[in-house]
Amino acid sequence: MSDRPIAPKLPLSRRQLMRATGASAVSLGLAGHALGQQKFTLRLAHSEAVGSPLTQALQRWCDVLNSRSGGRIDAQHFPGSQLGSYTQLIEQSRIGTIQATVGGPDTEESVAPEIAATGGAPGFIFKDEGHVDKILQGPLGDEVSAVARRKTGVEFVAYAEVGFRHILSKRPVTNLESLKSLKIRVPEIKVWVDFWRRLGASPTPLPYAEQYTALSTGVIEAVEADFFSILGFKWFEQAKHLTLSYHWFLPKAVRVNARWLDALPADLQALVRQSARDIFAEQRRDNRQRTDSALAELVKAGVTVHRLPNDEASRWFNTARPLFDEFSNKSAETRAMVGRILAAR
């Protein structure tokens, strides 16, 4: 025990008292404000490859939501099918088990086929990237989001993209004859099965995450995908032939559960929507700029590229063309949508 004398406590001056009282009040006020804020968790889960332009944009979106919301939104990012398969994640986003995902509008074929038409269904419906922009980056894109909200319980807050899809196969595919009976993986969606069956292939529905193993074991002989996914999931290690078919342009709707979105304060709703529009506009530009370099990486990795001559590409288109009529027959709304897309080519 110290033998130093204890100094007597002197009374605080008026100024010191006011300063101490004011500081305490500010501290309590901040604590009360922080405690009074409701926090909203956004679990963003998807099946896109780690490192792809889309996955990078989704991470940026989470970062922006976390920072600009002042911590009121806790955005968590789960890429590469960590929380389920593609179809499972789509369903989870509808019921609210997760709050957001990305997926092609073609996923809605059974619920809202008019939306599916804007997701590239059926194949060859989109002419080029400019054609896609005419459809989705304007009033028609807003209409599609409104239909999705009404029929599926999700709002399309923005449109990202992975670009045109091509065929990666174990044997060369250079014409319709060589495509015959090719065991090609397709999403678990009817319109994709119908498309490849009409072209003469043998479509095999499989979850997205199973493609590498299925290629390695021979369950399938080919996949159809964009360059970035082929690189990111390393499918090129199992199949060395890439046919530039440009058969399907796949936009990716950024899908947010409508009930979750409606529960946010107005300023956070605006933040979710506006930040998504800004970030995924940038993602589309970035994706298109990086396409050539991605193809060059595949060639460097030993992939042989096959280009379809114009007359052969026309054969593919004409063979698939009757699907437009079949698909249009799903509803009057679908027929109108297909007509509007084709008219904008």
Image: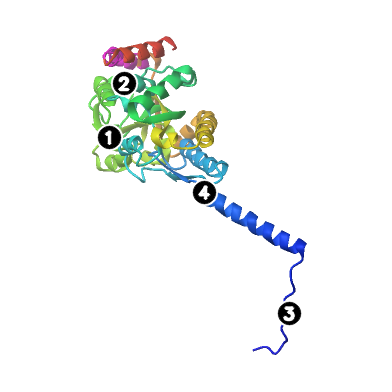
- Mark 4 and mark 3 in contact (Cβ < 8 Å)? no
Which residue was labeled with disc 3? 8
Residue for badge 2: 113
Q: Earlier in the sequence, mark 3 or mark 4?
A: 3
Give how far apart the Cα atoms at labels 1 and 4 are.
Answer: 57 Å
| Mark 3 to mark 2 CA distance (whole Å) | 83 Å
Name the disc covering residue 221, or none: 1
Query: Along the line of sight, which residue is nearer the eye, 191 or 31?
Result: 31
Q: In terms of sequence position, does the residue under pointer 2 or pointer 4 come before the other?
A: 4
Specify the segment rendered in magenta. 313-329
What is the C-alpha distance between the residues marked 3 and 4?
41 Å
| Among numbered discs 1 and 4, the one appearing first in the sequence | 4
From mark 2 to mark 4, how far is it between C-alphas?
Answer: 44 Å
Identify residue type, mark 4: Gly
Corner quadrant of residue 196? top left
Q: Position of residue 158 (x, y in %)?
A: 47, 29
| Mark pair 3, 1: CA separation | 88 Å
Can residue 161 be seen at all in this image of the molecule?
no
- How far apart are the two marked residues, 2 and 1, measured between alpha carbons? 29 Å
**Residue ID for mark 4:** 36
Q: Are marks 1 and 4 in contact (CB under 8 Å)?
A: no
Residue 254 in the image, given as x and y percentages of width and height: 43, 32
